Image: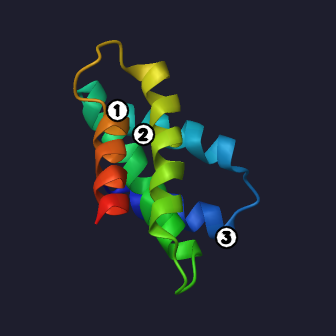
Amino acid sequence: MKQSPYRAYYSINSDKNNEEIDEELKIITQITHSHPTAIVASLVHNRFLTELIKTNKDLDFASLLDYLIKYSSDIEKEILSEKDDKISILLTSLLEDYNSG
């Protein structure tokens, strides 16, 4: 999870666009994490922290979860082949719990 500060720094203080930052972080994460699910979880975690840093006090948690579900699903299509251990499924369950409570 050491990529989190890099993600936040580049997102806020860099001329790089999100796609360039994402590609660099995917490479770093694939070097530092061996399991595909861990790679996806790390990238989603980094994006989550970045969005928290960028937001103000009026955070819409449900919208953020919905965004992370789409983001993780896109990464999973690239990295994961099996249907188990998908971060998007866990986030969808969390969003359903959040909306029902």
Percent of width and height locating residue 28: 42, 39
Q: Which mark is residue 31?
A: 1
Label drawn at residue 94: none
Quadrant containing the N terminus is bottom left
Residue that carries the numbered disc 2 in the rendered image: 28
Q: Which residue is mark 3?
A: 13
Identify which amino acid the numbered label 3 is placed on: Asn
How far is mark 3 from mark 1, CA to CA? 24 Å
The answer to whether one can see residue 6 in this image is no
Residue located 45% across and 38% down the image: 72
Specify the quadrant of the image occupied by residue 4.
Answer: bottom left
User: Is there any visible trace of residue 69 in the rendered image?
Assistant: yes
* Residue 90 relative to residue 6: left or right: left
Residue 53 horizontal side relative to residue 35, left or right: right
Reply above or below: 63 against 72.
Answer: below
Contact, mark 1 vs mark 2 (Cβ under 8 Å): yes
Number of numbered discs overlaid on the protein picture: 3
Closest to the observer, 26 or 38: 38
- The local crowd at label 1, few if under 14, some if 14 to 19, many if 20 or more residues have their Cα within 10 Å, is few
**If you read the primary sequence from the N terminus, does the residue marked by circle 3 or circle 2 appear first?**
3
Residue 67, x across and y down, in percent: 54, 50
Q: Residue at x 37, y 37 (%)?
A: 88
- Image colouring: rainbow
Relative to 95, is 92 above or below?
above
Q: CA distance from mark 1 to mark 2?
A: 5 Å
**32 or 100: which is nearer to us?**
100
Give amino acid for label 2. Ile
Q: Could you classify mark 3 by the number of other residues whose Cα lies within 10 Å: few (under 14), some (14-19), or many (20 or more)?
A: few
